[in-house]
Image (spheres, rainbow, N blue to C red):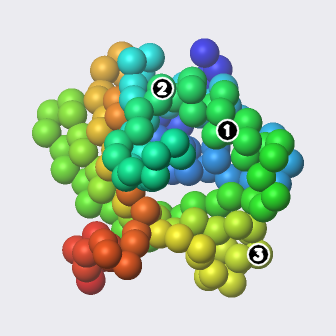
């Protein structure tokens, strides 16, 4: 794989930041999906906790990173009317040997201008599980939930 990709997975923080950076762009901008997929272990899962489109019930919805890129990722590039940017605002990192769990609180924006003006449209908590082997960090799972009135983000996840 490309040397510059390998450099992006040498630390936990750079691996997670690269995941955020790969998703960033204005409506119609191409993303680097090759790099994005490189961050994930081949058996990784991405799990969003949201309302199901079919019955409206909230529940975990599983997909592989490849499924994410071919559906949500392509939507972001071709059909979404706004951009998408995320900025991490706080992180709780727990490392035990070669395994790591990171709670990453972030804000989402519809444009670079909104991000510059600190005008997020939503905040999320991402749960990253990572493993270190083959001289690099791999995202093993990514599980996330957006902030709601019923479930505001706890102060500890905001660094307060």
Q: Which mark is residue 64?
A: 2
Residue on which the image places disc 1? 73
Does any portion of residue 136 appear in the rendered image? no
Along the polypeptide, which appears first: circle 1 or circle 3? 1
140 is higher (above) or lower (below) than 122: above
Residue 20, percent from left and from top: 56, 50
Say what secondary structure mark 3 lies in: helix
How crowded pointer 3 is (Cα within 10 Å; few <14, some 14-19, many 20+) is rated as: few
Name the image quarter holding residue 78. top right
How crowded pointer 2 is (Cα within 10 Å; few <14, some 14-19, many 20+) is rated as: some
95 on left or right of 64: left
Choose mark 1 or mark 3, whichever is in front.
1
Residue on which the image places disc 3? 113
Residue 29, percent from left and from top: 83, 47
Residue 87, percent from left and from top: 54, 64
Q: Residue at x 81, y 46 (%)?
A: 79
Foreground pick, 120 / 158: 120
Q: CA distance from mark 1 to mark 3?
A: 21 Å
């Amino acid at each position: 794989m490309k040397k510059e990709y390998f450099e992006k997975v040498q630390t936990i923080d750079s691996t997670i930041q690269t995941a955020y950076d790969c998703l960033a762009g204005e409506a119609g901008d191409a993303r680097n999906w090759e790099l994005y997929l490189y961050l994930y272990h081949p058996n990784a899962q991405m799990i969003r906790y949201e309302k199901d489109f079919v019955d409206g019930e909230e529940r975990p919805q599983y997909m592989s990173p490849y499924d994410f890129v071919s559906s949500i990722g392509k939507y972001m590039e071709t059909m979404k009317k706004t951009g998408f940017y995320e900025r991490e605002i706080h992180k709780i990192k727990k490392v035990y040997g070669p395994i790591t769990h990171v709670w990453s609180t972030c804000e989402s924006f519809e444009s670079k201008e909104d991000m510059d003006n600190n005008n997020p449209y939503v905040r999320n908590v991402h749960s990253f599980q990572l493993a270190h082997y083959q001289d690099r960090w791999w995202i093993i799972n990514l599980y996330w939930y957006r902030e709601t009135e019923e479930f505001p983000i706890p102060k500890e996840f905001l660094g307060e």
